[in-house]
Amino acid sequence: MATVRLSLDEVHALAARCLTANGCDAENARAVADIVSAAERDICLSHGLFRIPGYVASLRSGKVDGSARPVVDDLAPAVVRVDGKGGFAPLALEVGRPPLIAKARSQGVAALALNDIHHFAALWPEAEALAEQGLCAFAFTAAFPYVVAAGGRKPIYGTNPMAFAWPRPGRHPLVFDQASSALARGEIMIAAREGHEVPPGTGIDSAGRQTTDPNAILDGGAQLPFGGYKGASIALMIELLVGALIGDKFSFEALAADNNDGGPPKGGELLLAIDPARFGDPEGFAAHAELLFGEITSEDGVRLPGDRRRRNREVTARDGVAVDATLHGKLTELAGG
């Protein structure tokens, strides 16, 4: 596969140019480019520049308001809501983070509900940002219906990712971000683009047969939850948290309301923040956690979640990232040449 080598600054600039050239204002473009660049930095290619054509499509179709200004609504001592006003999620997340942190430190536990946003990115950035402020964090969002219920053939759930972050004073936070599906949607799309199979258990074809052909999964098939009913139960939980609980769309409702432009779904996101200083071991919680981490990593070949991303950051900060040449050409065109 032919590639083009870009520095992280060049990735950010290219992403921002694509967005501003197609109807995004500078502040929203910067916020989205920050997230896209972070994904490329961590070599999370399915959420990096790969997503920019979808962002652009949603701007061109008018589905997303590229100049949206999110509005904060204080719902309760431990609950804050951000109305995204039909814009992309990154700026809404930035606006909602300070009041969420303040409420978590005041109440011990706090929640942030984001409504009327279009989320197309990984969840680890918002969870990690909270952990860097000393908080435990959870993040949840849905998607379009791509994933079947356990034993079913009809896509009903989104890939429905969840992220968790744990603060480690003096160290980088522990962060994981995983889909409820056996494989993230973007990874299947990249496999189709590059012409290779996906692992067994990833999905089914239009006849309901398990397949390793990514095109069969994407074209009339469906994705499978990880671990059968276990992953399906988590997907169900997330649908309820980001749909019914906060008054936003289930994945199948997001699809029904969509214009099929290939861009991100319209829906909600829920973040939870916990201040360890307000619980039973405010002085020793961090050291106690490190005892567990030490036991986990004492075995050869075992690493903590997120360690690979951290190592990738060292490499990409030095060497930049390799971008698929065809994708780079398309992005250059979208940016106006």
Image (cartoon, grey):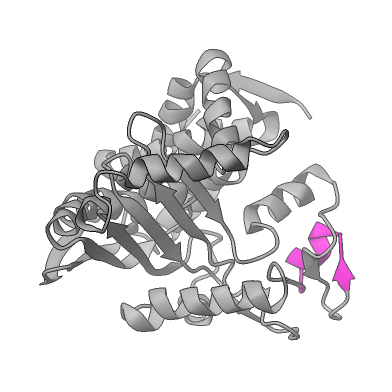
Whole-percent x, y for residue 243 in the image: 40, 79
Choose between 118 and 125: the one closer to the eye: 125
Residue occupying the far top of the picture: 318
Whole-percent x, y for residue 132 in the image: 32, 39
262, above or below 314, in the image: below
For the magenta stretch, what is the residue range? Answer: 210-221
Choose between 60 and 220: the one closer to the eye: 220
Q: In screen coordinates, is 331 left or right of 74?
A: right
Residue 240, visible in the rendered structure: yes
Give the residue drawn at x 43%, y 64%: 140
Please check the rendered image and state whether residue 220 is part of the magenta-colored stretch, yes or no: yes
Give the residue drawn at x 38%, y 84%: 244
> Could you tell me which quadrant the N terminus lies in?
top right
Whole-percent x, y for residue 303 in the image: 63, 38
Whole-percent x, y for residue 331 in the image: 55, 35
Quadrant of residue 119 within the rendered picture: bottom left
Please check the rendered image and state whether residue 95 is part of the magenta-colored stretch, yes or no: no
152, above or below 209, in the image: below
Quadrant of residue 104 within the rendered picture: bottom left
Q: How many marks?
A: 0
Residue 21, visible in the rendered structure: no
